[in-house]
Image (cartoon, grey):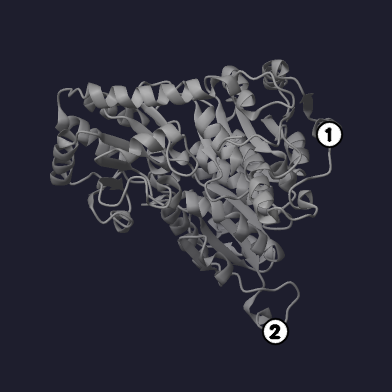
């Protein structure tokens, strides 16, 4: 590159991000201002947020919806907030690139204003965590960040830039051309083929099992393996359960679909998985939540596990046949190896009847006309009007249980995303990021008032950028999930237990309307569907506040 072709760091960063297909960056002032100016010239939208954590959540939602890298910026003083916002992306294995500023080395370890050492903050929530000290490192580190974020098991990455607002790199001369490797622009970067011997052994065991079950996790979602999972289940007549993150890999209306298993689950699904003599895990970490603390299935049950990460194979169940490889590729290989259809009608029918019994048991709650509104009825009404191509984004806790267990996704074109790491309040900013990724597709956020309070300010961000999500706000006036445990802690004692879970009554619809959102408050179950449909048609950021009963619990009550 001759002297006339040299470019500043701001141009280098902006051109690299744009070439990797990044359409939006999420940031908190002030960081990489010259880069942000150049991004505008290249047609990349800059979304200024009200907190670094919200910026990280938006980048997370963007990445999950697009399967591309989500990008967020923060200056030095906000780096700790941004690091905390990467926890959910790290636990859900989402490719997010966080860029922060760090004061120059001469300022470090000298009590400089606002200064912390950033590397330890990001170490536990990233898979690649580096500090730039000179401009010549930028091409290498930025290129490697995309490689790390999208390769193998995806995850967040972090680059710390010299100068607390990144201006040193912004204004430095870079002597290399941007190198863009298209393979690392989205996930999965590689579809690692499985060993055929392992596939053959896995198929033999599946065919020999009398009560096999498939459990599908978030890795299968990122691999886009839904069609293959459904085809394998139909070929061998195997019931399919999902982790909450795996919801949507098989439509809920499918006769072989069991729903979510584990802690955040349908009890009918737990019942069937408990009876399995073999469980095939596809892209699932087999952690405590999906197994109810490794009791479902019971220890000693034969396990087959497909995963892209070799150290995960058999980590939690020693009795495991490991199949290393991409979920989509591995399941396709199993279908090819299995060949002709094998029926297992007795087991498949038992699974279907168990699910039908669960639905019948809950039907009075789904149809309830009670006021305050039962959350089961809210779920039923949302399901009825959820567009065929919608992305449903759920908060954690009860929101995740309500949406995963009680809202059926009946179309393969519908997507489900939820706060995988238990980060309450994640869903609303994440939904904004998801909407930026999917354009005209409808994005519906489901959260409670406890979660919505976390990032209420981002309603203004949504209005300013016209990010037209629909937020279905399950307002029961407090932390409904905590209420039972707080009551138990008090026992028969006297005191103000409500101080631990109740909130001041607030009309969120009025707040949203004042900010500029389309907003409706609903207190009758018969009005829910129409209110959500009107919000979807409004073309504006929308809040549909539903007044529900805090006594409702997806675990009964």
**Count of numbered tags:** 2
Q: Looking at the image, do the residues carrying marks 2 and 1 touch, with CB atoms under 8 Å apart?
A: no
SS at circle 1: loop
Which residue in the protein does label 2 denote? Answer: 110
Q: Residue at x 14, y 40 (%)?
A: 200
Q: Position of residue 400 (x, y in %)?
A: 56, 39
85 over 516 or under it: above or below: below
Which residue in the protein does label 1 denote? Answer: 507
Q: Position of residue 395 (x, y in %)?
A: 61, 41
Q: Earlier along the polypeptide chain: callout 2 or callout 1?
A: 2
Q: Residues within 10 Å of mark 1 (few under 14, many from 20)?
A: few
Q: Position of residue 113 (x, y in %)?
A: 76, 75
Q: Residues within 10 Å of mark 2 (few under 14, many from 20)?
A: few
Q: Residue at x 54, y 27 (%)?
A: 407
Q: Residue at x 52, y 50 (%)?
A: 16
Which of the two discs, 2 and 1, sits closer to the camera?
1
User: Is 324 on the left or on the right of 99, as rendered?
Assistant: left
């Amino acid at each position: 590159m001759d002297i006339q072709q040299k470019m500043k760091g701001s141009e280098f960063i902006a051109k690299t991000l744009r070439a990797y297909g990044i359409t939006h960056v999420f940031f908190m002032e002030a960081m990489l201002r010259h880069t942000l100016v150049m991004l505008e010239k290249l047609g990349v939208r800059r979304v200024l947020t009200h907190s670094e954590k919200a910026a990280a959540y938006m980048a997370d939602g963007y990445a999950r919806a697009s399967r591309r890298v989500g990008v967020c910026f923060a200056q030095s003083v906000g780096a700790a907030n941004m690091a905390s916002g990467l926890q959910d992306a790290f636990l859900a294995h989402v490719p997010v690139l966080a860029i922060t500023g760090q004061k120059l080395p001469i300022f470090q370890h000298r009590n400089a204003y606002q200064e912390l050492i950033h590397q330890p903050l990001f170490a536990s929530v990233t898979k690649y965590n580096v500090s730039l000290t000179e401009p010549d490192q930028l091409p290498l580190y930025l290129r490697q960040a995309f490689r790390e974020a999208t390769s193998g098991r995806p995850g967040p990455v972090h680059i710390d830039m010299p100068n607390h607002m990144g201006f040193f790199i912004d204004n430095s001369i870079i002597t290399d051309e941007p190198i863009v490797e298209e393979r690392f622009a989205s996930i999965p970067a590689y579809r690692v083929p499985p060993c055929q011997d392992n596939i053959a052994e896995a198929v033999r065991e599946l065919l020999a099992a009398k009560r096999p079950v498939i459990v599908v996790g978030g890795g299968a979602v990122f691999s886009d393996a839904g069609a293959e999972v459904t085809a394998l289940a139909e070929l061998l007549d195997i019931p399919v359960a999902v982790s909450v993150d795996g919801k949507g890999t098989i439509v809920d209306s499918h006769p072989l679909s069991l729903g979510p298993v584990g802690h955040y689950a349908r009890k009918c699904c737990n019942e069937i998985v408990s009876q399995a003599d073999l469980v095939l895990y596809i892209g699932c970490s087999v952690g405590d939540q999906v197994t109810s603390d490794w009791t479902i299935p019971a220890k000693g049950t034969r396990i087959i596990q497909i995963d892209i990460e070799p150290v995960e194979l058999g980590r939690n169940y020693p009795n495991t046949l490991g199949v290393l490889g991409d979920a989509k590729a591995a399941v396709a290989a199993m279908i090819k190896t299995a060949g002709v259809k094998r029926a297992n009608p007795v087991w498949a029918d038992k699974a279907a009847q168990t699910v039908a019994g669960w639905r019948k048991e809950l039907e009075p709650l789904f149809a309830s006309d009670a006021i305050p509104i039962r959350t089961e009825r809210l779920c039923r009404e949302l399901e009825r009007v959820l567009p065929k191509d919608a992305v449903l984004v759920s908060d954690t806790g009860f929101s995740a249980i309500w949406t995963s267990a009680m809202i059926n996704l009946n179309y393969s074109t519908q997507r489900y995303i939820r706060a995988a790491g238990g980060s309450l309040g994640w869903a609303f900013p994440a939904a904004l990021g998801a909407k930026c990724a999917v354009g005209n597709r409808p994005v519906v956020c489901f959260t409670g008032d406890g979660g919505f309070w976390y990032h209420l300010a981002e309603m203004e961000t949504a209005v300013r950028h016209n990010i037209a999500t629909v937020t279905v706000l399950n307002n029961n006036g407090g932390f409904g999930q905590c209420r039972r445990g707080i009551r138990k802690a008090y026992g028969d004692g006297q005191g103000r237990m409500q101080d631990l879970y109740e909130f001041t009554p607030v009309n969120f619809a009025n707040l949203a309307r004042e900010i500029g959102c389309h907003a409706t408050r609903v207190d009758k179950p018969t009005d829910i569907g129409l209110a959500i449909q009107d919000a979807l048609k409004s073309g504006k950021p929308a809040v549909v506040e539903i007044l529900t009963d805090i006594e409702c619990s997806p675990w009964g009550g």
